[in-house]
Image (cartoon, grey):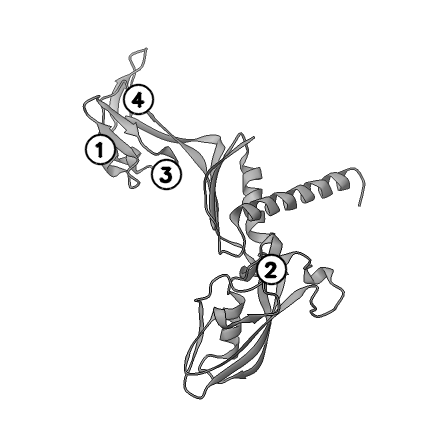
Amino acid sequence: MEIEVKNQTDDEITFIIRDAEVPFVNAIRRIAMMEVPKMAIEDVYMVQNDSAMFDEVLAHRLGLTPLVSDLDAVDGLVMPDNCDCGDHCPKCSVSLTLNKSGPGVIYSKDLVSSDSKIKPVYDTIPLLKLKEGQNVELEAIAQLGIGKDHAKWVPTTVCAYKQYPEITFNDDLNIDYACVEACPKKILKANKKKGKIEVTDIESCTLCKACERACEKQLVKDENGNEFSKKYINLGYQENNFIFKIETDGSMPPKEVLLKACDVLSNKADEFITFSKGGS
């Protein structure tokens, strides 16, 4: 198996996986979404809320506010299920407080964390609006969790793959330029001087087959003289090659999500091997 990184930023990574199978690639996708631990607000203790927003709605908005959850930030924290405190403590949680008065809009930057490393990823997320004389005071408890328990713990906003596209042309047929105009991604280019169609960016192909549908069928004969029809362009994919994209909500780098997902999959494989050998 080979992996080639095509594009990488702070919140996004696109890479190509070669010589792999769908079950393996799909396992990485599912684990990256559902089983990579991330920090999120779990409990909210309201002291005062004079705003028009219900306590439950405000708590929901706080829960969905992305918190920094990279390796450096969560170092030393354990999952709540692995802590013996019975509720929450500095070993398994971080406290964020909010104490503001109106008038004005209260933003995520107004949350004060007990841990300077674990804080909202973005400062400008509006939480609620206070009028003159209104106050809000609360304590929010953030803990590690995984996406299969609640969407607020899903670290990815995009986690998807597609099989590597493959476009071929039947050069024994008349060139049908209709497929060039039909392509929504504009990855086909008509070179009428050379009498051919060029593929400019195969990796941007979405396999929608609009190009195939736009081409008309042409009659041809096989070596035995039997007539059959086919189109100038053929769209398919490479069965064991994939284009994989991960985009995060900023709580952790996409490469870190990928590496953690691989670790989880490796541990699952080790557990299965141990079980199959009669272990426990």
Please report the residue visible at 46 percent of the width from the left and 79 percent of the height from the top. Answer: 53
| Label 1 or label 4, whichever comes before in sequence order | 4
- The quarter of the picture where residue 268 lies is top right
Q: Are marks 2 and 3 in contact (CB under 8 Å)?
A: no
Q: Can residue 231 be seen from the camera position used here? A: no
Badge 3 is on which residue? 204
| Label 4 or label 3, whichever comes before in sequence order | 4
Q: Position of residue 133 (x, y in %)?
A: 44, 88
Bin the neighbour count of mark 4 within 10 Å (Cα to Cα): few under 14, some 14-19, many 20 and up. few
- The quarter of the picture where residue 80 lies is bottom right
In space, the residues marked 4 and 2 are separated at their CA atoms by: 51 Å
Q: Is residue 86 left or right of residue 124?
A: right
Tell me the SS state at disc 2.
loop
Q: Can residue 212 be seen from the camera position used here? A: yes
Q: Is residue 198 left or right of residue 148?
A: left
Bin the neighbour count of mark 2 within 10 Å (Cα to Cα): few under 14, some 14-19, many 20 and up. few
Badge 2 is on which residue? 149
Bin the neighbour count of mark 3 within 10 Å (Cα to Cα): few under 14, some 14-19, many 20 and up. few
Task: Specify the label residue 80 is tagged with.
Answer: none
Q: Are marks 4 and 3 in contact (CB under 8 Å)?
A: no
Tell me the SS state at disc 1.
helix
Q: How many marks?
A: 4
Badge 4 is on which residue? 170
The amino acid on which the numbered mark 3 sits, given as a three-letter code, is: Ser
| Label 2 or label 1, whichever comes before in sequence order | 2
In space, the residues marked 3 and 1 are separated at their CA atoms by: 19 Å
Q: Are marks 4 and 2 in contact (CB under 8 Å)?
A: no
Badge 1 is on which residue? 178
